[in-house]
Image (cartoon, rainbow, N blue to C red):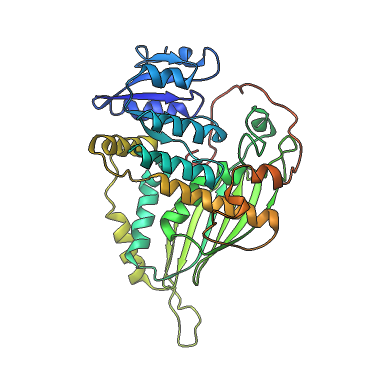
Amino acid sequence: MLKIGIIGTGGIAAAHIDGYRRFADECEIVALCDVAPGRAAALRAQPGLTSARAYERVEDMLAAENLDLVSIATPPSTHAELTIAALRAGVDVLVEKPMAPSLEECDAMIAAATENDRILSVVAQNRFRDDMATLKEVLDSGLIGPVSHAQVSSAWWRGTAYYDLWWRGTWESEGGGCTLNHAIHHLDLTLWLLGAPRAVTAVLTNAAHENSEVEDLSVAVLQYDRALAEVTSSVVHHGEEQAIVVHGRHARVSQPWKVVADAAEPNGFPVPGGDPGRVAKIEALAASHRALEHVGHPGQIGDMLGAVRERRRPAVDGTDGRRAIELVTAIYQAGIERRTVDLPVSADDPYYRAGTLVERAPHFFEKTTAVADLPGAITVGSSSAIDD
């Protein structure tokens, strides 16, 4: 029975707790930790957690417990420090997205995992969704032909009070705005589906949140060898209607699911009705997808538990988490410096280092409110929305 600790007991911790509960025959949550006085102890009242011990200091939890795995579900600026502490204590780590605000911190986390022979995984739960797995299977099949254009819409909506929470809305404590903390899901999926681009250009703004210094909207263009991908990162889009649309030479596929395949007349104009044979092949491949046993956080947690037991690489490791941060870094650098940024980002680039965004990023507005907690539940507006 693997012994699990949860570090950070705010809203997203519930997804981790639910995930571990799905595997009650494999693991047990034995420790909860949160720096907010009484918060971890209050969570123990939930079913299945009454025997867990509560801590307010990570050092105390790591010293007192013989843990196999911890989930880190704290604000982004704390991820590196907490992850490294757990790895050095001999504990495997599943850390929430985003991995860390800087590539420097990501590399320190990966190094700590290697040096201590521990497993590090970064949450990318949307890879564990049937719709996204189906899209990847179709793209990998080659049926749509070489990719020419992708449109990725990470469309969220948040009211101004969202940024009143103490750690949100500043470059120092949140690490960035919607590009880092919301679109990280879609950026990870873009890398998973299409691979890494060779260059990035972007623009950033704050269109609707005057109590936040970070961006609430960015638009990036990713350049591949011949293809382009547009990525919109937003918390200003009403309805949260998200989509990933991929156009290949022979067909277009997307989630929400749609398949279109055009064919050319001798003069190059579209044939009425397109290419129904190719559409049928793509639809048949999609229909053959074998449903995942567990989806979202439970899917990734199940994989991570297997990795811990078998001492193997998890489906999403620290290198995967770092790739997403590298893309975010390039988007921020391109938007702030108003230029195209080539990838990869090298270690001698100022934007590789922790603190550069704090020094160089614009304050679109000054943060005006900082409350300890916000009332109410986390809600996602659209049925097509990527899990937060």
For the residue pair 253 and 265, the one nearer the viewer reads as 253
Q: For residue 339, which quarter of the picture?
A: bottom right
Q: Nearer the viewer, residue 332 or 161?
A: 332
Give the image quarter of residue 311. Answer: top left
Percent of width and height locating residue 136: 37, 56
Q: Residue at x 46, y 27 (%)?
A: 13
The one of 315 and 206 positioned closer to us in this rendering: 315
Furthest residue to the bottom? 266
Query: Residue 335 falls in which quadrant of the image?
Result: bottom right
How many numbered tags mark residues here? 0
The answer to whether residue 68 is visible is: yes
Q: Is residue 260 left or right of residue 235?
A: left
x%, y% of residue 28?
A: 30, 22
Residue 366 percent across, percent down from the top left: 76, 36
- Is 327 rendered above or below residue 30? below
Tell me where residue 117 appears, x and y as whole percent: 32, 38
Does residue 216 show up?
no
Q: Residue at x 50, y 67 (%)?
A: 224
Image quarter hosting the N terminus: top left
